[in-house]
Image (spheres, rainbow, N blue to C red):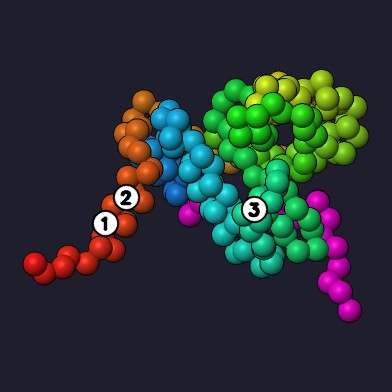
Amino acid sequence: MSAPIISLADFFEKIKNQDKTEYKKFMQILMLTYGTSLPCNRFAFGNCNEYAIRDLIKETGYTVNVLQNATRIDIEVENFGKFSIKYSGSGDIKLHNSNNQANHDMSMCDTLLVTPTVWWFLRPSEIEAKGIILKDYLKNTGDGLSLKATILTALKTKDYQYRFNFDISVDKSNCQHKEINEIIYNYIKEQITPTSL
């Protein structure tokens, strides 16, 4: 007998109620040590957020599969579905890029969005059910697709239920702006065993 399908309401409620203390500490250290001002940090920052959320969801007891080579999506929760994970500190939300090629994909998939103060689960069908025309908020950036940040204000106005407040904000002026790539460099150097001459 297969496991029952997990509804969005049940999934989101479980994430909302899960202890996020460790996630908050992790993200605040990431933001204060590395941040996203350096272009070389942005991709790694997004991946670190994905890993942290993956672990958080696993702690709820759900079975999680990371989809590293999938297009547009990052994770699958068994009996719930597949979705993308995004962090946005400010401005429009980058949904996907086309790796320096012209973007022809104007579709948005289910997205778990973390901002400095609010978590959102953005499901296109739920957004449309609130009377919001999603395509009016999607913006082709030439090499990718973005979601206009103004949609979050519109969703608040419509009392969109798949959101909750959770503050992980930091004072960006205190960021050290270190390069994340240096961690990889130092790690590999430590693996090199000195040879005797």
The residue labelled by disc 1 is 189
Cα distance, mark 3 to mark 2? Answer: 24 Å
Question: In which quadrant will I find the N terminus?
Answer: bottom right
Residue segment shown in magenta:
1-23
Cα distance, mark 2 to mark 1? Answer: 6 Å
Q: Are marks 3 and 1 in contact (CB under 8 Å)?
A: no
User: Residue 84 vs residue 79: left or right?
Assistant: left
**Structural crowding at the residue carrying mark 3, measured as other residues with C-alpha within 10 Å and reported as few (<14), some (14–19) or many (≥20):** few
N-term mark: 3 or 1: 3
Q: Amino acid at mark 2?
A: Tyr
Q: Position of residue 91 (x, y in %)?
A: 60, 23
The residue labelled by disc 2 is 185
Q: Is residue 82 magenta?
A: no
The residue labelled by disc 3 is 69
Q: Position of residue 55 (x, y in %)?
A: 57, 59
Q: Could you say whether the residue bearing mark 1 is in a helix, strand or loop?
A: helix
Give me the residue at 28% from left, 52% from top.
186
Give me the residue at 42% from left, 43% from top.
30
Q: Amino acid at mark 1?
A: Lys
Question: In which quadrant will I find the C terminus?
Answer: bottom left
Q: Position of residue 172 (x, y in %)?
A: 41, 28
Give me the residue at 69% from left, 67% from top.
63
